[in-house]
Image (cartoon, rainbow, N blue to C red):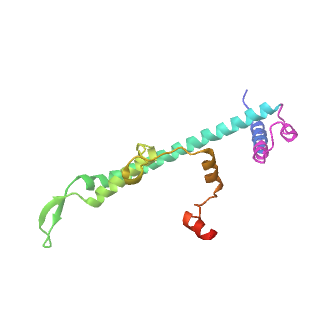
Amino acid sequence: MAWNKLKLDEVAVRRTALLKLRREGVRYDDDRVEALGYSSPDAARRDLSRALEAHRNEEAAEVSIYRQQENERLDALLEAAWPRATTPSPVFDKEGNVVDHALDMRAVDTVLRLMDRRAKLNGLDMPAKTEVTGAGGGPLQMSQASTAELEAIMNAGPGPALDTPHENADSSG
């Protein structure tokens, strides 16, 4: 059975009100949620889940359309720059004589930047591997700390400790 426009609008208004209540921290079993017309907290929970899923699907469709448009724009730019980046052009001396043939390096750079942009847009690049090393590029030194040492570090505050052993010795004397 197809829903008419009025029913769709009622559902949208109810879902909007439910979403507002949930953002305010109102629980599904609250009387205000039931007052929206839900038969149970589970019904409200399912309805909000459906609304969020529909929104995710719409968002994914919009992202897909945007990505396609950007790829088409990159195609047009790449098509324009490709011949100058791949076909050697004559190089002239001061008198206008052809002395060599060379690629247009600015066009090559443009093509490479367009290709890099396409790879980022489409997620083609592999993640970069990183490695944490210790002093001098060697292995990172790890040690076990006691519970008391960990608590002291946690209670030290957000910044490094200001007291050094020398300062402690000076302040006591």
Q: In this rendered view, identify the residue nearer to me: 144 or 104.
A: 144
Residue 89 figure quarter: bottom left
Q: Quadrant of residue 105?
A: bottom left
The quadrant of the picture occupied by the C terminus is bottom right
Where does the N terminus fall, quadrant-wise?
top right
**Residue at the image point whose x is 88% and y is 39% from the top:** 31
Magenta run includes residue 168: no
* Residue 19 shown in magenta: yes
x then y, percent, for residue 48: 73, 37
Name the outermost residue toward the bottom: 94
Q: Residue furthest top?
A: 1
User: Front-most of 173 and 159?
Assistant: 173
Range drawn in magenta: 17-39
Residue 137: give x, y in percent of width and height: 37, 51
Q: Is residue 166 left or right of residue 104?
A: right
The residue positioned farthest toward the front in the image shown: 173
Residue 115: image location, x then y, percent: 36, 50
> Which residue is more in the foreground, 149 or 154?
149
Q: Looking at the rendering, which quadrant does residue 13 occupy?
A: top right
Task: State the image coordinates of residue 23 (x, y, percent, origin top left).
Answer: 75, 47
33 vs 143, left or right, is right
Point 82% across, 31% down: residue: 40
